[in-house]
Amino acid sequence: MSKAVLALWHREIVRFLRDRPRVTGSLLQPVVFWLLFSGALHGSFKPGGMDYGEYFFVGTLAMITLFTAIFATITVIEDRKEGFLQGVLVSPVPRAAIALGKILGGASLGLGLAVVFLLLAPLAGVALSFDRVVAGLGVLALLAVAVTGLGFALAWVMDSTAGYHGIMMLFLMPMLLLSGAFFPMESAHPLLAWVRHVNPMTYGVGALRHAFQGEVAGVPSFAVCLAGTLLFAVATFALGTFVVTRRSARDAV
Amino acid sequence: MSEAPAIVASGLEFAYGDRRALRGVSFEVPRGAVFGCLGPNGSGKSTLFKLLSTLVPLQGGRVSMLGHDLATAAAAIRARIGVVFQSPAVDRKLTVRENLRYAGMLLGLSGRELGARSDALLAAGNLADRAGDLVGELSGGLRRRVELAKCLLGRPELVLLDEASTGLDPAARRDMWAVLRAQPRLSVLFTTHLMDEAAEADQLLLLDQGAIVAAGRPADLMREVGGQVLEVETADAPALLRDLEQQCGARGEVVDGVVRLAGERVHELVPVVVERFGARVQRLQLAHPSLQDVFLRRTGRRFPAAEPEPAPAKGRRRRA
């Protein structure tokens, strides 16, 4: 089982590194987004009195984990189409190992890319300390597992990458937008304010803010954010494992 | 201890909703046999393959593979079989060796043992000098060899091949079978829609519309049809057949626009046809019965011309 997980994890990393456009896009997209948003909103938008570049820096970290998860898990659909997945399904590997390898692979990529982006922290005016980095990496790892688990579960039950893109725009993007990653949610319309509380990304982004920025107005306590993120990760991981072990009739393409 | 047969299947039933894909299929594959399943598209052979490869759960009937019950011990079966799908299950973005390494790790192999087995299989498949190439850059034939090496990595006792020679040129096909036949005591079950490939099987199952229409050694099946077959191609086949029946007392039929006469003395008709109807004949062929004739005899229909199977379900999924 452990060898199988290792093989599937390693495959994710190797395939990522070998895909130059994907590497370039993954590294530059968050930088570009961060530069554009913080540049455009620099003078006009100061959430909680903070410069927008600093505010959105943490949001960008959350965005990296989510986008990386999406691109990593969309390969599940490609693997199924290309036949690779069939080969894995008829090998003596326990189904749970497939979920584990794929989720850990995608989460590792997200964490790695987030670490690279962290190098820009001084530019954003985010002061890094040893404690902050350790706490931040812990939260990032948890959040990366959570969103990759979610992406995996969605991709596993999807038939087409186009359908997955639809779900992404309809479900995953709003999750990120309403999480406090791009703008504060505490003065939002009452309906959205309610959505904010049930949106698990809220707690991931909140935990990142606590780790990298300390107390920020309008964010639940660190303990609540951590518990929420942990629950998010455990739930999606369980969901990913569940879908993979279920519905075997569907695997016969 | 006597070895259990490679496969014993009895009363297999499978339906996609209302459509019955398998209707009471029973057969046995002895150890070491090369067992073929021949059938046109929609005959049920792909469904049979999916069942045996443990991809879909059994709906009706029983299957024992290598002594394990498919319904309850799929995991034990997976550890002892190798499967080659119609759509290549290799990762095109990885090298040949990487594909084998990951496949080996999925089987629980590692280190020196995995390296040694990979090397041996790469050598056997004449792939040693391509080990570092990306699979996506290989030709279809070479890719199939990688797939075969991957499938043999776990030293399976039974290999299942689904239309494995599709897209291969005759030389690549021969290569593939040479590698398979070189494995001692390996049992093979393969599906095909190619008559000549099916004729190479030790045992053959002829499937049509989810049911077995013939089973046995290909040579025996062809001999059962008996006599010879005379085929006459002409512009108006029904008219020629009518004339042949009225003027020569021949009995035959028109199949796919070709007049077809079968029997022990059908060769005697050759000079008659040439003399009386020579001007109308476009092609005349006298041959021993083929698997085509076996199929025709058993189903009353001609086996569809060898056309490639529909693309292996890209994105299409049947829900069972």
Image: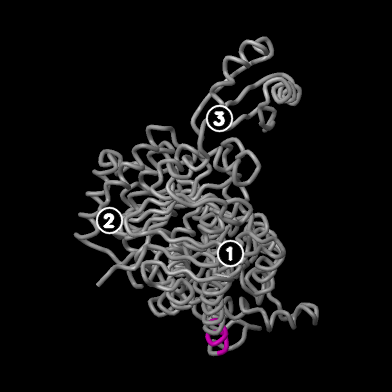
- Which disc is residue B185 wearing? 2
Which class describes the residues within 10 Å of circle 3: few (<14), some (14-19), or many (20+)? many
Counting residues from the start of the chain, the first of labels 3 and 1 encountered is 1
Viewer-nearest of discs 3 and 1: 3
Cα distance, mark 3 to mark 1?
Answer: 32 Å
Please say which color scheme the image uses: one colour
Cα distance, mark 2 to mark 3?
Answer: 37 Å
- Which disc is residue B177 wearing? none
Q: Is residue A226 magenta?
A: yes
What element does badge 1 sit on?
strand
Residue at (24% x, 43% y) in the render = B123
Task: Tell me the chain of label 3.
Answer: B
What element does badge 2 sit on?
loop
What range is drawn magenta here?
Answer: A224-229
Lateral position of residue B275 relative to residue A227, left or right: right
Residue A173 location, x and y as percent?
67, 65
Residue at (36% x, 44% y) in the render = B145
The amino acid marked with disc number 2 is Arg
Q: Which residue is tagged 1?
A: B24
Cα distance, mark 2 to mark 1?
Answer: 29 Å
Residue B134 vs residue A67, the one in the foreground: B134
